[in-house]
Image (cartoon, grey):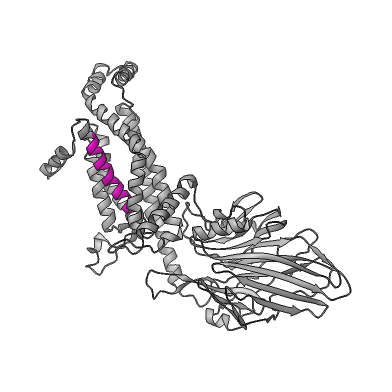
Amino acid sequence: MHSEDNKNLLLAIALSVIVMIGWNYFYGVPKLDQQRQAQQQAQTTAPAPATPGALPQAGAVATPAAPGTTTIPAGQLLSREAALALSPRVTIETATLTGSISLIGGRLDDLSLVKFREEVAKTSPNIVLFAPANAKDGYFADFGWVGTVGQNIALPGPETRWQASGDKLTATSPVTLTWDNGQGLIFSRKIALDSQYLFTISDSVKNNGTAPVALSGYGRISHVGTPTTLGFYVLHEGPIGYLDGSLQELKFDDLKKAKTKAFPKNDGGWLGITEKYWASALIPDQQKNFSAAFGASGTGDPVYEAAAISDAQTIAPGASSETTMRLFAGAKEVDTINAYGDALGIKKFNLMIDWGWFWFITQPMFKLMQLVFHLVGNFGVTILIVTVIIKALFFPLANKSYASMAKMKAVQPEMLAIRDRFADDKMKQQQAMMELYKKEKINPMAGCLPVLIQIPVFFALYKVLFVTIEMRHAPFFGWIKDLSAPDPTNLFNLFGLIPFTPPSMFHLGIWPIIMGITMWFQMKMNPEPTDPVQKTMFAWMPLIFTFMLGSFPAGLVIYWAWNNLLSVSQQYLIMKKMGTKIELWDNLKAVFKRG
């Protein structure tokens, strides 16, 4: 590759780095700050929540009356405690979940995750998943029946007062809710919960009347207002489902404009709303057809819904009918998600976790890290060990690559002579270069292979650290308490010695600095380029990447620093074995001599 090609390549790299830095500091970091501020800001007044919209229709089933929300004074939202106190409740208590079921409407609208907290500190509050509709960030699931057109039947709704068989739902003691409509129909709702995050809701109706009735069972997840999301393009947050034979990922803004997105015929699948680490999902009977839809209703900040409805069932006098739907509500733990998908035959339930385009690398990477973690008990040490394993797997290829680079150095005088000899004839210059490569058995592109291999592996590790809850709040050693968060130290306040919080774009912790130093050493392993553009680019690259990785997860920065150190050691040994001059010491001497 001649000088002009090198300049174009380096210009492209430089522009790419500038774009990455600009996006990270002017969009990515401010977006994170915005999310943190939104989570910390206590809101006591806001527009009254809109009424959830209608369910999707199935066959001859008519659109039901909207479930609605508890009436509250216009322009106010209640505190969580006040909203919970408005209705009698059945307590939920397991090793993983706490909360309650509202007996007004029979809603699951109060749920917290026992094992997960907002911050690393043990005194930090637990993660709240569900909340009543008339509280801030209302988020709930409700279930029921829908009648056909022309039937004048009283059905359970948002203001229905259910009777409970007990006062506590646990992993070993389900609860049954009952309601008599006064027209000969007795409704029962059995709610069971396993030891993790799966509810099983069995809705049944007994027809004690004199005429047949046609009903369809439904389930719905509703979120009042637009949730705060991270806004990263590498992570989907929002309505999600596996419907119509493919993964459906919708954005809140798009759904707000479209109002509804329907999937009328499904023979398996699921749908819900996902966040980075938490999710809720409806799982209809996988052996029966169902209709599904995502919707957004109401003016201003709408109510977002994910709903599923079964085909209509005709219930004769004296007969009964039952429909069963499951609800996943909890943390997106990989093993738990996979176990539910396998045990219940849920189609592609593993796609609840956003493994990304490189899923074929990301998933094996996670399994490898999980295996090593069970042996060493520290995810930071796991990252170091997995990096060594990856280096060992690709050692033969890297060995050939570095060997080819060493040969390129050895014939560099001949290459320069060819360029001088055919300075005015690029065609003959290229032909002479090819003959030289063939004679010396050199692959000029071999030096790029380690970089090309590292890109998907790096991205796969980034996805593992970024999306899997197993990495959340995982400590390393010293000041790193959460490998999924940036290094909390900062050079610009002397690592905490000065009581000053620099702007986000100037966040530069100890580990990013270590990474930059290792990258600088890696650059110094090779002779400095003679081309001034290349020389300037390589000189600034370690500093650019040091700042760019300042806001990346600490685990990823540790990986990159360790990988650089291993690469330097590997290249040193190969070059020494082949008798090639190691430029590191001369380059370091030149740096200190100039200093």
Inspect the magenta stretch and tell me whether residue 570 lies in it. Answer: yes
Q: Nearer the viewer, residue 374 or 75?
A: 374
Inspect the magenta stretch and tell me whether residue 37 lies in it. Answer: no
Q: Residue at x 35, y 46 (%)?
A: 389
Residue 267 percent location from the top left of the image? 70, 53
Toward the left, the furthest residue is: 593
Q: Quadrant of the N terminus?
A: top left
Kindly indicate the quadrant of the structure image that contains residue 396: top left
**Predominant SS along the magenta part:** helix
Magenta span of residues: 556-574
Q: Residue at x 65, y 72 (%)?
A: 191
All told, the count of numbered labels is 0
Q: Is residue 300 left or right of residue 544?
A: right
Residue 205 percent location from the top left of the image? 77, 72
Q: Vertically, is 179 above or below 360?
A: below
Kindly indicate the quadrant of the structure image that contains residue 149: bottom right
Residue 568 percent location from the top left of the image? 25, 42
Q: Nearer the viewer, residue 18 or 461?
A: 461
- Residue 252 visible to the viewer: no
Q: Vertically, is 236 above or below 473?
A: above
Q: Is residue 509 left or right of residue 290?
A: left
Q: Nearer the viewer, residue 290 or 65?
A: 290
Q: Vertically, is 344 above or below 592?
A: below
Q: Vertically, is 146 above or below 547?
A: below
Q: Quadrant of the C terminus?
A: top left
Q: Residue at x 22, y 19 (%)?
A: 417
Q: Is residue 350 left or right of residue 158?
A: left
Residue 331 percent location from the top left of the image? 50, 64
Q: Nearer the viewer, residue 323 or 23?
A: 323
Toward the right, the furthest residue is: 210
- Residue 212 visible to the viewer: yes
